[in-house]
Amino acid sequence: MVTTTETTNILTQPKVTEPPAPSLQRWLKHFFYMPAAKRYFTQQDQEMIAQAVHQAEQGHVGEIQVVIEGNLPWAQAYYQTPKMRARQLFAELGVWDTECNSGILLYLNLCEQTVELVIDRGICQATEQKVWDEICQDMITQLKQQNYRQAVVLGVEKIGELLNFYYAQQITDQSNELENAPILLD
């Protein structure tokens, strides 16, 4: 089990203050959902997303990791929401472990058409929640119009603009700590 430490700050706010109750409905929805990440994102789409991440990471030390998941794993869907899954992946993929604490996980769950942004502590202090909410809403609007690739590219570009604004004068290292290619989980 992955836990949040006092040095990791999860930016997105829960819709309810209590932890989600186990949900048979959520489990059934994810159990019967056909794997979709590779259906909706071709190899060309993945390359375009990787290029967008590469462009968005230029000029600052911020790092973006994109994870696209068709549905929650069946064994976890009963107890876990997409928000909880995003936090788990943030920890497991080491997005929190960038040198300047500037990692951002952009998580897209296709089954529920939800977008979660998990931001490391280095960038969290300089931004407001409404900026991140706007990025999520813009992406969800594109998803509802079935513009899947455009939704992800748009989100990455907007995140890049924020990182460029915050980290523009803090360039010390241009190494790429996280892979630019999106991670597709089905």
Image (cartoon, rainbow, N blue to C red):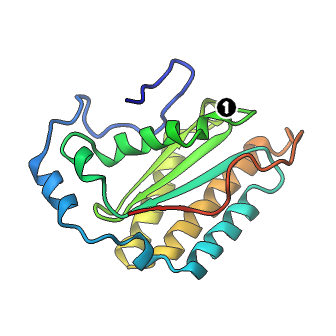
Q: Residue furthest front?
A: 75
Residue 6, above or below 100: above
Which residue occupies the foreground of this view, 15 or 10?
10
The amino acid on which the numbered mark 1 sits, given as a three-letter code, is: Gly
Q: Quadrant of residue 72?
A: bottom left
Q: Quadrant of the C terminus?
A: bottom left
Q: Quadrant of residue 4?
A: top left
Q: Residues within 10 Å of mark 1 (few under 14, many from 20)?
A: many
Residue 88, above or below 131: above
Residue 38, above or below 62: below
Q: Residue furthest left?
A: 24
> What residue is drawn where x is 73% and y is 46%?
177
Q: Is residue 166 left or right of residue 43?
A: right
> Is label 1 in a helix, a strand or a loop?
helix
Q: Position of residue 165 (x, y in %)?
A: 75, 48
Q: Residue furthest top?
A: 6
Which residue occupies the foreground of this view, 12 or 71?
71
> What residue is drawn where x is 66% and y is 67%?
50
Q: Is residue 133 left or right of residue 165?
A: left
Q: Position of residue 44 (x, y in %)?
A: 60, 81
Residue at numbered disc 1: 122
